[in-house]
Image: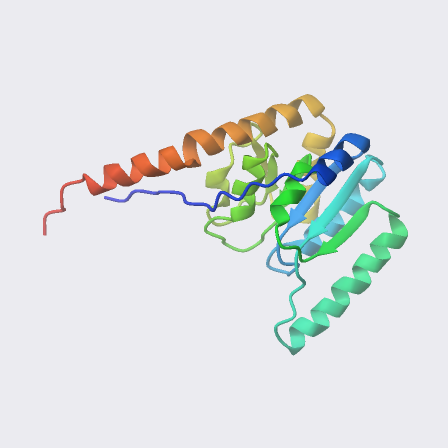
Amino acid sequence: QIAVIYNYPPRVGLTQSLLTVKKQTNGIVLLYVGRLSKQKGFYELLEAFRKIADKYPLAVLHVVGDIENSSAEGLEYKSTVLLDLEKFYTQFPKRVIYHGSVDDPTLFYDLADIHVCPSIYGEVASNVIFEAKAHGVPSVIFKVGGLPELIDHQRNGFICREINAAALAEGLEYFLSNPTARHAAGAAARESLQTRFGIECFTQQWLAVLAMPEASP
């Protein structure tokens, strides 16, 4: 018998400074947390933002994480990413903000309205989705690996129909164009963490597994 038990590190933090910023801003904050690499779909994210930027002038993208640079090829990639980010700063002043690596990226979820996890490879799960749920933020993802198991489409997040920038832009626009759906999805995301992935559910699932009779040889 196979049992799927989801596990996540429950890191939740609040800072008065970020909460104050959120109260003072009129923008809609998109948040990316993770390594800036090709596998994580960072370029698809930049292109998707470019597609929706003019239509939604209040959308602001915050990027948190290191840039891949573990090899000679990685160093070249890092230089390319920094150049592309500089172009975005010029094209969209104050609307694409790169924070680099931070000690506790979960603090930025208090600022976010929409979380983006555009991984294009088969991740089994992603801690950032659990962290977004803990802060009541809906996630927009691609249909890869085990990520769709973490999202109820258009209820507590959005699963893009294809793995490309156009489909990602469509997912972002779903929440950008409908504040009611965005707020409801955020509440549903937090609820799903408690009912499907929380510590109580985790404990009960393990107890059920441990109580299973041994399989016959």
Q: How far across and down, in percent of the image, does residue 26 sit?
A: 82, 31
Q: Is residue 92 above or below residue 27?
A: below
Q: How far across and down, in percent of the image, does residue 210 sit?
A: 21, 42
| Residue 16 at least partly seen | yes
Which quadrant of the structure image shows residue 143?
A: top right
Q: In which quarter of the image is the N terminus?
A: top left
Residue farthest along the left direction in this orientation? 217
Viewer-side residue, 155 vs 143: 155
Residue farthest along the bottom direction in this orientation? 72
Viewer-side residue, 84 vs 97: 97
Q: How far across and down, in percent of the image, does residue 163 sit?
A: 61, 48
| Residue 160 at least partly seen | no
Q: In this view, does 104 lie to the left or right of 6?
A: right
Q: How far across and down, in percent of the image, does residue 213 sit?
A: 14, 41
Viewer-side residue, 103 vs 53: 103
Residue farthest along the front direction in this orientation? 16
**Total tally of numbered discs in the picture:** 0
Viewer-side residue, 4 vs 143: 4
Residue in view at x 88 percent, y 51 percent: 91
Residue in view at x 42 percent, y 33 percent: 196
Residue in view at x 66 percent, y 75 percent: 73
